[in-house]
Amino acid sequence: MQVVILAAGQGTRMRPLTESRPKPMLPVADRPLVAHTVDAAVDAGASELVIVVGYEAEAVRSYFGEQYRGVPVTFAVQQSQQGTADAVRAASEYLDGPFAVLNGDNLYDPESIETLLSSGPALATVRVADPSNYGVISVEDGRVTGIVEKPDDPPTDRANTGAYVFPAKAREWLDVPESERGEYEITDVVARVIEAFDVTPVELDRWLDVGRPWELLEANEWKLAGLERRLDGDVSDEGDLRGSVVVEDGATVESGVVIEGPALIRSGAEVGPNAYIRGATLLGEGTHVGQSVEIKNSVIMAETSVPHLSYVGDSVLGRQVNFGAGTKVANLRHDGEDVRVTVKGERVSTGRRKFGVVVGDGVKTAINTSLNAGVVLSEGARTTPGESVTRDR
Ligand code: TTP
């Protein structure tokens, strides 16, 4: 079956991390976010991948190329990001039968994708505690009977996960009217399909929509937890690596380093001497974590340095960031409230008691900078020595 992967979005809620890369290419464990979904589709027997690209398309194109794991890849270009139905419309000229659609910024459990792809017209759902923020699915006698967007009074606890198998006929129904929020939505296509076809609900065991920076941490927590211990790099005998730690070939771990898994140290990374890495932490390619630095439950992207005397907790650091000696991140509020972050101009609760900072590419902090919990630093931002940063910049 042809599988359409939606990867054209601008990822505005993920800024500044998506300032110069598409959200689907953000790192989740050992590969980009979208590759987890594509791999699940390939494992489930996809005959062709039709990847819809738009925003920062080149990064997606060059990662997958014309063939990916032996499966042909076609790129459909969505000129402007006008919604998910519009994205599938961009792909429709390449489709010639029933087809699946998956969101390129969602993590699905791979076994359920296999079930989905072999279920005829189907829609993947997941049970959630508060369905009012989702498309909510009604089911009767083993078939989908309704879909309603973000209802005040949800009829069920089944959320739509953006994973579908459509009959070929659905290609004729992609010209939906504009929605209230000014987009062309795939859920309006689904509403038509369930009137005309028996659509099977496939319940996912696990699912994550990666829209905001702390969800990138959750995605890494999920995928790093599945790592099997492997020490291929240059690891000092005087290091202490506990649990599921992966040190890739070409990475160096010097003496006095303690790493508590799950943790992934990618090729070209240099750790230590005397560093402490714990929680689900990803150190990207070519990163440097040095003397007396503690990193906990964080994503540190490629070529970033935290060279001396720093603490980084529950944070996401972009590429080519440099933390001056003594830079410290606060990741807990003393009033016990969940940490809040500004997303598209609005203060939003992360739902986490512990959350640190979000740091855009190329940021440099001066010595002894202290960064308050929930602070977002945009690409290229600078701090001054001894500065206490309590507001985004
Ligand atoms: P969204 O998460 O709704 O949009 P986004 O990724 O642009 O993020 P944000 O809201 O933060 O700006 O998108 C859901 C999926 O659909 C995601 O995989 C991106 C994809 N998409 C497109 O391919 N084209 C589009 O026009 C839109 C809106 C989304």
Image (cartoon, rainbow, N blue to C red):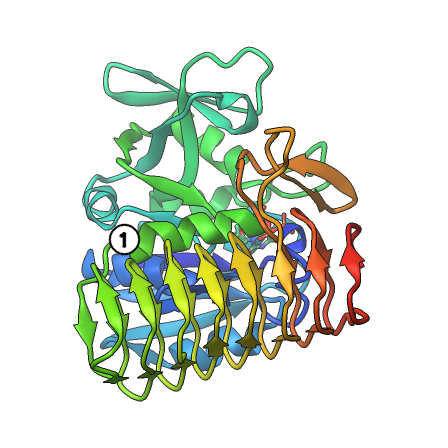
Q: Quadrant of the N terminus?
A: bottom left
Under tag 1, what secondary structure? loop
Q: Is residue 56 visible?
A: yes
Image coordinates of residue 195 in percent, x first then y, are: 41, 24
Q: Is residue 1 visible?
A: no
Q: Is residue 10 left or right of residue 24?
A: right
User: Residue at horizontal 43%, vertical 32%?
Assistant: 160
Residue 301: % across, % down:
51, 71
Left or right of residue 62, residue 364 in this image: right
Residue on which disc 1 sits: 225
Q: Residue at x 48, y 45 (%)?
A: 172
Nearer the observer, 329 or 299? 329
Residue in the picture at 54% in, 60% down = 312
Q: In the shown orientation, is residue 383 left or right of residue 253?
A: right
Q: Which kind of residue does numbered mark 1 sit on?
A: Ala
In the displayed structure, 286 sits above or below 164; it is below
How many C-alpha atoms fall within 10 Å of the one at disc 1: few (<14), some, or many (≥20)?
A: some
- Quadrant assignment for the C terminus: bottom right
Write down the quadrant of residue 43 in the picture.
Answer: bottom left
- Depicted 72 relative to depicted 83: above or below: below
Q: Nearer the viewer, residue 241 or 113?
A: 241
Nearer to the camera, 184 or 335: 335
